[in-house]
Amino acid sequence: MQGYNGIAKTLHWLVFVLMSGAFTVGFYMDDLPLSPTKLQLLSWHKWCGVTIFVLVLLRLCWRLLNPPPPLLTPMPPWQRRASEAIHRVLYVLMMAMPLSGWLMSSAKGVQTVWFGLLPLPNLLDKNPPLGKALSEVHTALGYIILAFVAVHVLAALKHHFIDRDDVLARMTPGLKPLSK
Amino acid sequence: MRLFVFAFALLLSAPTFASERALQAVGSRVTFSFQQMNVPMDGSFKKFSGKINFDAAKPDTSSIEMWVDTGSISVYEEADPEVVKPIWLNVAAFPQAHFVSKSIKALGNGHFQATGTLSIKGASREVSVPFDYKEQAANATVDGQFTLKRGDYKIGEGEWSAFDVVANDVIVKFHLVVSPAAAAKQ
Protein backbone atom coordinates (compact mmCIF):
# COMPACT_ATOMS: atom_id res chain seq x y z
CA MET A 1 0.00 0.00 0.00
CA GLN A 2 1.25 3.44 -0.89
CA GLY A 3 -0.13 5.98 1.54
CA TYR A 4 -0.25 9.74 1.68
CA ASN A 5 2.89 11.35 3.08
CA GLY A 6 3.15 12.45 6.68
CA ILE A 7 2.44 16.12 6.07
CA ALA A 8 -0.67 15.40 4.01
CA LYS A 9 -1.93 13.07 6.77
CA THR A 10 -1.16 15.55 9.51
CA LEU A 11 -2.92 18.38 7.70
CA HIS A 12 -5.94 16.18 6.93
CA TRP A 13 -6.47 15.14 10.54
CA LEU A 14 -5.64 18.55 11.95
CA VAL A 15 -8.32 20.07 9.74
CA PHE A 16 -10.69 17.31 10.85
CA VAL A 17 -10.11 18.16 14.53
CA LEU A 18 -10.47 21.91 13.94
CA MET A 19 -13.59 21.47 11.81
CA SER A 20 -15.16 19.30 14.51
CA GLY A 21 -14.40 22.02 17.05
CA ALA A 22 -15.66 24.84 14.85
CA PHE A 23 -18.90 22.96 14.10
CA THR A 24 -19.57 22.02 17.71
CA VAL A 25 -18.97 25.56 18.96
CA GLY A 26 -20.83 27.07 15.99
CA PHE A 27 -24.00 25.08 16.51
CA TYR A 28 -23.84 25.35 20.30
CA MET A 29 -23.36 29.10 20.54
CA ASP A 30 -25.88 30.04 17.87
CA ASP A 31 -28.88 30.05 20.22
CA LEU A 32 -27.07 31.33 23.32
CA PRO A 33 -28.15 34.74 24.63
CA LEU A 34 -25.45 37.41 24.43
CA SER A 35 -22.96 36.81 27.25
CA PRO A 36 -19.20 37.03 27.75
CA THR A 37 -19.08 33.26 27.19
CA LYS A 38 -20.83 33.62 23.85
CA LEU A 39 -18.46 36.38 22.73
CA GLN A 40 -15.52 34.24 23.80
CA LEU A 41 -16.86 31.21 21.93
CA LEU A 42 -17.54 33.40 18.90
CA SER A 43 -13.95 34.62 18.89
CA TRP A 44 -12.57 31.09 19.24
CA HIS A 45 -14.90 29.93 16.47
CA LYS A 46 -13.63 32.71 14.20
CA TRP A 47 -9.98 32.04 15.03
CA CYS A 48 -10.57 28.37 14.33
CA GLY A 49 -12.22 29.19 11.00
CA VAL A 50 -9.34 31.39 9.87
CA THR A 51 -6.88 28.66 10.89
CA ILE A 52 -8.83 26.10 8.86
CA PHE A 53 -8.80 28.44 5.88
CA VAL A 54 -5.01 28.78 6.09
CA LEU A 55 -4.49 25.03 6.59
CA VAL A 56 -6.72 24.21 3.62
CA LEU A 57 -4.69 26.59 1.48
CA LEU A 58 -1.55 24.82 2.70
CA ARG A 59 -3.12 21.45 1.90
CA LEU A 60 -3.89 22.56 -1.64
CA CYS A 61 -0.34 23.86 -2.14
CA TRP A 62 1.13 20.70 -0.66
CA ARG A 63 -1.12 18.57 -2.86
CA LEU A 64 -0.05 20.43 -6.00
CA LEU A 65 3.63 19.99 -5.12
CA ASN A 66 3.20 16.43 -3.84
CA PRO A 67 0.43 14.73 -5.80
CA PRO A 68 -1.31 11.92 -3.87
CA PRO A 69 -0.05 8.40 -4.60
CA PRO A 70 -2.00 6.61 -7.32
CA LEU A 71 -4.97 4.68 -5.97
CA LEU A 72 -4.31 1.11 -7.08
CA THR A 73 -7.33 -0.28 -5.28
CA PRO A 74 -9.71 -1.91 -7.76
CA MET A 75 -12.80 0.28 -7.98
CA PRO A 76 -15.55 0.84 -10.58
CA PRO A 77 -15.00 3.99 -12.70
CA TRP A 78 -18.11 5.73 -11.30
CA GLN A 79 -16.70 5.42 -7.78
CA ARG A 80 -13.43 6.99 -8.86
CA ARG A 81 -15.31 9.84 -10.52
CA ALA A 82 -17.57 10.30 -7.50
CA SER A 83 -14.60 10.26 -5.14
CA GLU A 84 -12.77 12.82 -7.25
CA ALA A 85 -15.84 15.07 -7.44
CA ILE A 86 -16.60 14.87 -3.71
CA HIS A 87 -13.01 15.70 -2.79
CA ARG A 88 -13.10 18.72 -5.06
CA VAL A 89 -16.40 19.87 -3.55
CA LEU A 90 -15.02 19.38 -0.03
CA TYR A 91 -12.03 21.57 -0.80
CA VAL A 92 -14.29 24.27 -2.23
CA LEU A 93 -16.58 24.07 0.82
CA MET A 94 -13.68 24.15 3.29
CA MET A 95 -12.61 27.44 1.70
CA ALA A 96 -16.13 28.84 1.24
CA MET A 97 -17.17 28.19 4.84
CA PRO A 98 -14.55 30.39 6.57
CA LEU A 99 -14.86 32.93 3.77
CA SER A 100 -18.63 33.24 4.34
CA GLY A 101 -17.95 33.71 8.05
CA TRP A 102 -15.40 36.41 7.33
CA LEU A 103 -17.83 38.16 4.96
CA MET A 104 -20.62 37.85 7.53
CA SER A 105 -18.47 39.31 10.31
CA SER A 106 -17.44 42.16 8.04
CA ALA A 107 -21.04 42.98 7.14
CA LYS A 108 -22.05 42.79 10.81
CA GLY A 109 -19.33 45.29 11.63
CA VAL A 110 -17.43 42.91 13.92
CA GLN A 111 -13.89 42.63 12.60
CA THR A 112 -12.00 39.35 12.78
CA VAL A 113 -8.75 39.58 14.75
CA TRP A 114 -6.93 36.26 14.44
CA PHE A 115 -6.05 35.02 17.93
CA GLY A 116 -6.74 38.56 19.13
CA LEU A 117 -3.48 39.59 17.48
CA LEU A 118 -3.76 39.83 13.73
CA PRO A 119 -6.59 42.03 12.45
CA LEU A 120 -8.00 40.83 9.14
CA PRO A 121 -9.32 43.54 6.84
CA ASN A 122 -13.08 43.81 6.63
CA LEU A 123 -14.16 42.53 3.23
CA LEU A 124 -17.45 44.46 3.25
CA ASP A 125 -18.76 47.68 4.73
CA LYS A 126 -21.05 47.41 7.71
CA ASN A 127 -24.47 46.36 6.44
CA PRO A 128 -26.66 44.56 9.01
CA PRO A 129 -29.27 43.17 6.54
CA LEU A 130 -26.47 41.73 4.40
CA GLY A 131 -24.87 40.37 7.57
CA LYS A 132 -28.08 38.55 8.38
CA ALA A 133 -28.30 37.10 4.86
CA LEU A 134 -24.66 35.97 5.03
CA SER A 135 -25.30 34.39 8.39
CA GLU A 136 -27.95 32.24 6.69
CA VAL A 137 -25.49 31.37 3.93
CA HIS A 138 -22.92 30.41 6.59
CA THR A 139 -25.42 28.14 8.36
CA ALA A 140 -26.58 26.58 5.08
CA LEU A 141 -22.97 25.88 4.08
CA GLY A 142 -22.55 24.18 7.45
CA TYR A 143 -25.32 21.70 6.67
CA ILE A 144 -23.99 21.16 3.14
CA ILE A 145 -20.50 20.43 4.49
CA LEU A 146 -21.97 18.03 7.05
CA ALA A 147 -23.73 16.16 4.24
CA PHE A 148 -20.57 15.90 2.12
CA VAL A 149 -18.43 14.95 5.12
CA ALA A 150 -20.99 12.25 5.98
CA VAL A 151 -20.63 10.76 2.47
CA HIS A 152 -16.82 11.08 2.73
CA VAL A 153 -16.72 9.30 6.11
CA LEU A 154 -19.25 6.62 5.15
CA ALA A 155 -17.35 5.90 1.95
CA ALA A 156 -14.05 5.61 3.85
CA LEU A 157 -15.63 3.26 6.41
CA LYS A 158 -17.28 1.23 3.67
CA HIS A 159 -13.91 0.81 1.93
CA HIS A 160 -12.24 -0.19 5.18
CA PHE A 161 -14.79 -2.50 6.77
CA ILE A 162 -16.78 -3.84 3.81
CA ASP A 163 -14.40 -3.74 0.85
CA ARG A 164 -11.47 -4.22 3.24
CA ASP A 165 -9.19 -2.22 0.94
CA ASP A 166 -6.49 0.37 1.68
CA VAL A 167 -8.47 3.57 1.02
CA LEU A 168 -8.84 4.61 4.67
CA ALA A 169 -5.45 3.24 5.67
CA ARG A 170 -3.75 5.45 3.05
CA MET A 171 -4.74 8.52 5.03
CA THR A 172 -4.77 7.19 8.57
CA PRO A 173 -1.54 6.91 10.55
CA GLY A 174 -1.03 3.48 12.08
CA LEU A 175 -3.95 1.89 10.25
CA LYS A 176 -3.44 -1.19 8.09
CA PRO A 177 -6.00 -2.40 5.55
CA LEU A 178 -8.13 -5.26 6.85
CA SER A 179 -7.26 -8.25 4.75
CA LYS A 180 -10.09 -10.35 3.40
CA MET B 1 -33.10 105.26 38.14
CA ARG B 2 -32.44 101.90 39.70
CA LEU B 3 -33.82 100.21 36.62
CA PHE B 4 -31.60 102.35 34.46
CA VAL B 5 -28.49 101.38 36.40
CA PHE B 6 -29.49 97.75 36.19
CA ALA B 7 -30.02 97.98 32.45
CA PHE B 8 -26.74 99.78 32.03
CA ALA B 9 -24.92 97.19 34.09
CA LEU B 10 -26.51 94.44 31.99
CA LEU B 11 -25.43 96.18 28.83
CA LEU B 12 -21.87 96.44 30.07
CA SER B 13 -21.69 92.94 31.36
CA ALA B 14 -23.35 91.21 28.42
CA PRO B 15 -20.36 91.25 26.05
CA THR B 16 -18.11 89.68 28.66
CA PHE B 17 -20.13 86.48 28.60
CA ALA B 18 -19.68 83.96 25.85
CA SER B 19 -22.58 83.77 23.48
CA GLU B 20 -24.76 80.71 23.33
CA ARG B 21 -24.22 78.61 20.25
CA ALA B 22 -27.00 76.51 18.80
CA LEU B 23 -25.94 72.89 18.44
CA GLN B 24 -26.87 71.78 14.95
CA ALA B 25 -28.22 68.27 14.58
CA VAL B 26 -27.09 67.98 10.97
CA GLY B 27 -23.46 66.98 10.86
CA SER B 28 -23.02 66.59 14.62
CA ARG B 29 -22.01 63.18 15.91
CA VAL B 30 -21.39 61.50 19.23
CA THR B 31 -19.67 58.16 18.74
CA PHE B 32 -17.63 55.74 20.83
CA SER B 33 -15.30 52.82 20.41
CA PHE B 34 -14.04 50.01 22.61
CA GLN B 35 -12.28 46.67 22.37
CA GLN B 36 -14.15 43.37 22.49
CA MET B 37 -11.69 40.45 22.63
CA ASN B 38 -9.17 42.82 21.01
CA VAL B 39 -11.61 43.57 18.23
CA PRO B 40 -12.20 47.31 17.77
CA MET B 41 -15.93 48.05 17.97
CA ASP B 42 -17.71 51.27 17.09
CA GLY B 43 -21.02 52.67 18.18
CA SER B 44 -22.94 55.91 18.22
CA PHE B 45 -25.68 57.89 19.94
CA LYS B 46 -28.29 59.24 17.57
CA LYS B 47 -29.87 61.76 19.94
CA PHE B 48 -28.13 64.39 22.02
CA SER B 49 -28.45 68.05 22.78
CA GLY B 50 -26.20 70.73 24.16
CA LYS B 51 -26.00 74.15 25.63
CA ILE B 52 -22.79 75.60 24.36
CA ASN B 53 -21.71 79.03 25.50
CA PHE B 54 -18.39 79.38 23.88
CA ASP B 55 -16.12 82.17 22.89
CA ALA B 56 -12.66 81.11 21.81
CA ALA B 57 -11.30 84.42 23.09
CA LYS B 58 -12.93 84.01 26.50
CA PRO B 59 -12.66 80.40 27.58
CA ASP B 60 -12.98 81.45 31.24
CA THR B 61 -16.55 82.58 30.78
CA SER B 62 -17.42 79.78 28.38
CA SER B 63 -19.33 76.69 29.37
CA ILE B 64 -20.43 73.49 27.73
CA GLU B 65 -23.28 71.27 28.82
CA MET B 66 -24.33 68.16 26.93
CA TRP B 67 -27.13 65.65 27.27
CA VAL B 68 -26.98 62.33 25.46
CA ASP B 69 -30.05 60.09 25.16
CA THR B 70 -28.77 56.73 26.29
CA GLY B 71 -31.64 54.96 24.53
CA SER B 72 -30.43 56.22 21.15
CA ILE B 73 -27.35 53.99 21.33
CA SER B 74 -26.37 51.82 18.40
CA VAL B 75 -23.51 49.32 18.52
CA TYR B 76 -24.22 46.20 16.48
CA GLU B 77 -27.37 44.25 15.84
CA GLU B 78 -27.04 41.58 18.55
CA ALA B 79 -25.85 44.08 21.15
CA ASP B 80 -28.41 46.84 20.59
CA PRO B 81 -31.28 45.19 22.50
CA GLU B 82 -28.87 44.26 25.32
CA VAL B 83 -27.05 47.53 26.04
CA VAL B 84 -30.24 49.35 27.07
CA LYS B 85 -30.90 46.81 29.84
CA PRO B 86 -30.31 47.57 33.53
CA ILE B 87 -26.93 45.77 33.66
CA TRP B 88 -25.61 48.04 30.91
CA LEU B 89 -26.99 51.59 30.55
CA ASN B 90 -30.30 51.09 32.38
CA VAL B 91 -32.02 53.42 29.94
CA ALA B 92 -35.39 53.12 31.72
CA ALA B 93 -33.99 54.59 34.94
CA PHE B 94 -31.27 56.81 33.45
CA PRO B 95 -32.45 58.04 30.05
CA GLN B 96 -29.71 60.64 29.73
CA ALA B 97 -26.00 60.91 30.21
CA HIS B 98 -24.92 64.42 31.17
CA PHE B 99 -21.75 66.47 31.01
CA VAL B 100 -21.32 69.95 32.43
CA SER B 101 -18.06 71.84 32.32
CA LYS B 102 -16.59 73.52 35.40
CA SER B 103 -13.79 75.24 33.58
CA ILE B 104 -12.47 75.58 30.07
CA LYS B 105 -8.94 76.59 29.34
CA ALA B 106 -7.21 77.46 26.10
CA LEU B 107 -4.17 75.36 25.16
CA GLY B 108 -3.33 77.43 22.09
CA ASN B 109 -3.75 76.87 18.36
CA GLY B 110 -7.47 76.21 18.65
CA HIS B 111 -6.95 73.48 21.26
CA PHE B 112 -8.97 73.69 24.46
CA GLN B 113 -9.60 71.56 27.49
CA ALA B 114 -12.88 71.36 29.32
CA THR B 115 -12.93 69.94 32.82
CA GLY B 116 -16.25 68.98 34.25
CA THR B 117 -18.57 66.36 35.60
CA LEU B 118 -19.76 63.41 33.57
CA SER B 119 -22.82 61.62 34.92
CA ILE B 120 -23.91 58.29 33.51
CA LYS B 121 -26.29 55.80 35.11
CA GLY B 122 -26.37 57.70 38.38
CA ALA B 123 -22.59 57.86 38.82
CA SER B 124 -20.67 61.12 38.46
CA ARG B 125 -16.98 61.50 37.73
CA GLU B 126 -14.72 64.41 36.97
CA VAL B 127 -13.37 64.20 33.44
CA SER B 128 -11.05 66.27 31.27
CA VAL B 129 -12.12 66.64 27.69
CA PRO B 130 -9.66 68.05 25.19
CA PHE B 131 -11.24 69.54 22.09
CA ASP B 132 -10.46 71.58 19.02
CA TYR B 133 -12.52 74.55 18.03
CA LYS B 134 -12.60 75.71 14.42
CA GLU B 135 -14.45 78.58 12.79
CA GLN B 136 -15.83 77.49 9.43
CA ALA B 137 -17.48 79.53 6.72
CA ALA B 138 -21.05 79.19 7.96
CA ASN B 139 -20.62 77.65 11.39
CA ALA B 140 -18.05 76.37 13.83
CA THR B 141 -16.98 72.86 14.82
CA VAL B 142 -16.03 71.36 18.15
CA ASP B 143 -14.08 68.09 17.86
CA GLY B 144 -12.65 66.00 20.60
CA GLN B 145 -12.40 62.71 22.38
CA PHE B 146 -11.76 61.34 25.83
CA THR B 147 -11.57 57.94 27.45
CA LEU B 148 -13.93 56.81 30.16
CA LYS B 149 -13.79 53.64 32.24
CA ARG B 150 -17.09 51.85 31.90
CA GLY B 151 -16.50 50.25 35.30
CA ASP B 152 -16.65 53.71 36.92
CA TYR B 153 -20.28 53.98 35.89
CA LYS B 154 -21.23 50.30 36.29
CA ILE B 155 -21.83 50.00 32.54
CA GLY B 156 -21.82 46.23 32.28
CA GLU B 157 -22.60 44.58 35.59
CA GLY B 158 -22.58 40.98 36.78
CA GLU B 159 -20.95 38.66 34.26
CA TRP B 160 -19.91 41.70 32.19
CA SER B 161 -18.07 43.42 35.04
CA ALA B 162 -14.80 41.67 34.15
CA PHE B 163 -12.88 43.39 31.39
CA ASP B 164 -11.39 40.36 29.65
CA VAL B 165 -14.07 40.21 26.96
CA VAL B 166 -15.35 43.80 26.83
CA ALA B 167 -12.54 46.19 27.76
CA ASN B 168 -12.92 48.84 30.46
CA ASP B 169 -11.80 51.73 28.28
CA VAL B 170 -14.42 53.40 26.12
CA ILE B 171 -13.24 56.18 23.83
CA VAL B 172 -15.97 58.79 23.37
CA LYS B 173 -15.62 60.99 20.30
CA PHE B 174 -17.67 63.98 19.32
CA HIS B 175 -17.97 66.23 16.34
CA LEU B 176 -20.32 69.11 17.08
CA VAL B 177 -21.46 71.64 14.56
CA VAL B 178 -22.53 74.88 16.22
CA SER B 179 -23.76 78.22 15.00
CA PRO B 180 -21.01 80.74 14.26
CA ALA B 181 -19.58 83.14 16.78
CA ALA B 182 -21.74 86.22 17.19
CA ALA B 183 -20.55 89.16 15.12
CA ALA B 184 -18.40 91.66 17.01
CA LYS B 185 -20.86 94.50 16.62
CA GLN B 186 -23.59 92.75 18.64
Image (cartoon, coloured by chain):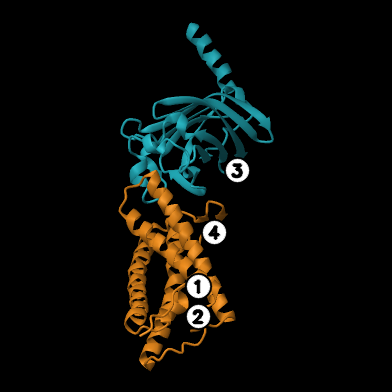
Chain colours: A orange, B cyan
Residues at circles 2 and 1 in contact by the CB criterion of under 8 Å: yes
Name the foreground residue: B97 vs B53.
B97
The mark that comes first in sequence, 1 or 4, is: 1
> In the image, which disc is placed on residue A120?
4
User: In the rendering, at what x and y percent does residue A110 appear?
Assistant: 46, 54
**Residue topped by disc 3:** B136
Chain to which mark 2 belongs: A
Subunit of label 1: A
Q: Report the amino acid beneath label 1.
A: Lys
Which residue position holds label 2? A3
* Apparent side of residue B2 relative to residue A86 in the rendered image (left or right): right
Chain identifier of the residue bearing label 4 in the image? A
State the SS at label 2: loop
Query: Gap in Å between the C-alphas at discs 2 and 1?
Result: 9 Å
Q: Residue at x 39, y 26 (%)?
A: B122
Q: Amino acid at mark 4?
A: Leu
How many residues crowd mark 3 within 10 Å: few (<14), some (14–19), many (20+)? few
**Residue located 57% across and 17% down the image:** B13
- Label of residue B101 in the image: none
Q: Are marks 2 and 3 in contact (CB under 8 Å)?
A: no
Q: Which one is closest to the eye, mark 3 or mark 4?
A: 4
Q: CA distance from mark 1 to mark 3?
A: 66 Å
Marks 4 and 2: which is nearer the front? 2
x and y percent of residue B101 in the render? 52, 25
Image quadrant containing the C terminus of chain B? top right
> In the rendered image of this protein, does residue B42 appear above or below residue B121?
below
Residue placed under numbered mark 1 in the picture: A9
Above or below B15: residue B76: below
